[in-house]
């Protein structure tokens, strides 16, 4: 059996998928302020640049650029997950614990992919922004409010009508 090995590349750009254990939950968007605060707190402690982000009800996708001499994205994710979980508890949300005494909110692992070139970067930015349409949450990518697509539209990088139902041009490395 092949063991999965994470690729640590100082100063690298990485695509991540982070998922809740309960795939029917919508807690990420119901408590978006807690999630935003968790991201900001960690970014202030251990810097990273968010290139693109989409938050869906039960998972999120993001692209980060790490500082030049830093490859520790795992610490950042551990802190974001911890801060978000604690923030939910502090706001009165009841979370169950597993046998280890850990809150059973997040899947234990996350998906990571190091971006190799500009084509890879563009493909993953498009994947992130199109994801709400893919999951049939909206008909147009810009209709999803929990997405960095709005920054890309303001900057003139993506048009407001980009990413409609008929705009999917490839499988972004996934099998359908």
Image (cartoon, rainbow, N blue to C red):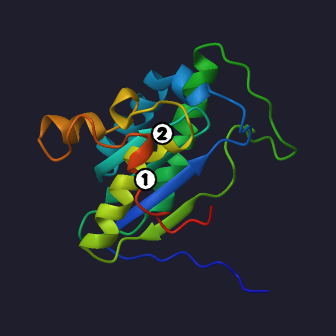
Residue occupying the point 33% across, 74% down: 10
Vertical position of residue 12 compared to residue 36: above or below: below
Q: Position of residue 133 (x, y in %)?
A: 48, 39
Q: Secondary structure at mark 2?
A: helix
* The label number, if any, that marks residue 133 in the structure image: 2
Asked if residue 19 lies left or right of residue 34, the reply is right
Tell me the CA gap for discs 2 and 1.
Answer: 9 Å
Q: Secondary structure at mark 1?
A: loop
Asked if residue 141 lies left or right of residue 173, the reply is left
Q: Position of residue 162 (x, y in %)?
A: 29, 42
Q: Residue furthest left?
A: 156
Q: Residue furthest right?
A: 99
Identify the residue under disc 1.
168
Residue occupying the point 80% across, 41% down: 101
The N terminus lies in quadrant: bottom right
Kindly indicate whether the residue at mark 1 contacts the one at mark 2 (C-beta within 8 angstroms): yes
Vertical position of residue 50 compared to residue 116: above or below: above
Front-lying residue, 24 or 46? 24
């Amino acid at each position: 059996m092949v063991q999965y090995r994470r690729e640590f590349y100082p100063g690298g750009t990485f695509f991540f998928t982070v998922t809740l254990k309960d795939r029917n939950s919508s807690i990420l968007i119901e408590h978006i302020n807690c999630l935003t605060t968790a991201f900001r707190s960690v970014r202030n402690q251990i810097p990273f640049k968010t290139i693109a982000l989409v938050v869906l009800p039960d998972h999120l996708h993001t692209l980060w650029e790490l500082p030049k001499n830093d490859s520790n994205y795992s610490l950042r994710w551990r802190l974001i997950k911890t801060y978000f979980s604690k923030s939910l508890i502090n706001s009165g949300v009841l979370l169950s614990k597993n046998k280890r005494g850990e809150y059973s909110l997040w899947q234990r692992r996350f998906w990571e992919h190091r971006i190799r070139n500009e084509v890879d970067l563009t493909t993953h930015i498009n994947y992130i922004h199109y994801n709400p349409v893919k999951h049939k949450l909206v008909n147009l990518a810009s209709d999803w409010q929990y997405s960095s697509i709005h920054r890309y539209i303001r900057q003139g990088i993506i048009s407001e009508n980009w990413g409609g139902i008929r705009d999917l041009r490839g499988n972004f490395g996934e099998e359908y």
